[in-house]
Image (cartoon, grey):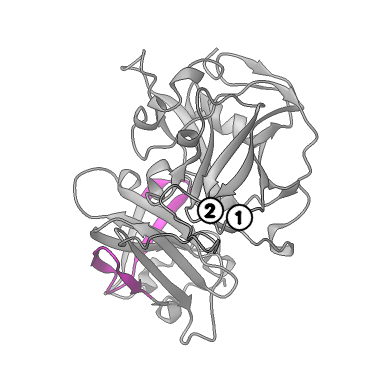
Amino acid sequence: MKNLHLLLLIVLLLSACSGPTSPQAFPSQTQTSITTTTSPANLQLALNLAPCPYYDMCPGALFINTLIPGELEPGRVENVDVPYDRPVSFYIGWIARDHTILAQNMNNMQFFFMIDGRNYWDDAYMGMPGAYVYEDEPNTEYASQGAGVEISGWKIDQPHEIRLGYSINAEINDGWDTYASGTVIEHIFMINPIFTALETSTATGNPPTASPEIPVTGKIEGKVYRSDPDQPIANVTVILIREAGTGTFEEKIVSVTATDLNGNYSLSGVQPASYTLWISLEKIPEFANYPFCSDNVPEDWIAYLTGYSAIPIALLPPNMEFSVVAGDGLIKDIDMAVIQCNLP
């Protein structure tokens, strides 16, 4: 039962995949009522959420599994103390015998990410389908789909219940086992934000203070707009690619995010290195004919057919080749006015 074994080896899974590393969570069958009708856009949350579909996309975050002693078991409530001043990443995944079966499974599975009983799921948390290799089957590749999110902005004495998982809406088979409609597979965490051991309190009884840390990573942020910043474009997929080394487009992806309603995006925890910043237009209605109107892309832009369904076409705007050093705060705005690819 491929999706039910190797729970003891969850940490080893982080390096077992080919392509971007995406930790897998292995399901156990439970019956739970999941409410998924509330849109994240209509909710106000004090915490900060950021897409992190691959384990190495958020290098500045603590992986939740490393904060839990012993095994992580789906369906069991894990009580976890987390440093209030550190982002924490959470992951869930699914493995199927091949990509055809994986796609069929995904059509009948609904992912959710709940905080204190409310669903904050965003499709940006979902990674791209990839290959998965079991440690005991090094010569066989299976298909996997992962999802992840980074949470920051914890407050002392403000605990939260986090649930990350998926519900199965119709009977499916992953190539080995059958899962009934109504099955819910989830990780449950009771998060208690705490002061860390590095913090000290004074003899006067003042609140603890944290020693300042020297930044070891950088940050990239910017705005995507037409002609001027007062014409923002929402839901533009922004892709950070590491330039060094070999590999496919997918294998060199460091981080993926999307612009918000105001056209803004932010990529934090970026390791010092050389990068290119690409964008994808697949979710924007006015560019629905792309790439069939690619002749309209100016010469100083680069269009690339990635071959991946999640990011079929990627564009490299000019001046989006750069290096990041520790402590950098780079601003990379993108003017889309030169791209003319409107619906007829």
Question: 117 or 98: nearer the eye?
Answer: 117
| SS at badge 2 | loop
The circle drawn on residue 84 is 2
Inspect this view and state whether residue 292 appears.
no
Crowdedness near tag 1: few (<14), some (14–19) or many (≥20) residues, C-alpha within 10 Å: some
For badge 1, the amino acid type reads Ile
Residue plotted at (47% across, 38% down) = 129
Mark 1 lies on residue: 156
Question: 36 or 227: nearer the eye?
Answer: 36
Spot occupied by residue 50 in the image (x, y as percentages of width and height): 52, 56
Query: Magenta residues, as a range?
Result: 306-332
Picture quarter containing residue 191?
A: top right
Spot occupied by residue 344 in the image (x, y as percentages of width and height): 57, 72
In the picture, the quarter occupied by the N terminus is top right
Spot occupied by residue 58 in the image (x, y as percentages of width and height): 41, 50
User: Is residue 43 a member of the stretch shown in magenta?
Assistant: no
Distance, label 2 to label 1, CA atoms, is 6 Å
Q: Are marks 2 and 1 in contact (CB under 8 Å)?
A: yes
Q: Is residue 140 above or below residue 305?
A: above
For badge 2, the amino acid type reads Tyr
Spot occupied by residue 89 in the image (x, y as percentages of width and height): 49, 45
Inspect this view and state whether residue 145 appears.
yes
Picture quarter containing residue 214?
A: bottom left
Residue plotted at (29% across, 74% down) = 318
Question: 122 or 279: nearer the eye?
Answer: 122
User: Is residue 320 a member of the stretch shown in magenta?
Assistant: yes
Name of the residue lying farthest toward the left: 245
Residue plotted at (22% across, 55% down) = 243
Left or right, residue 189 beside residue 306 = right
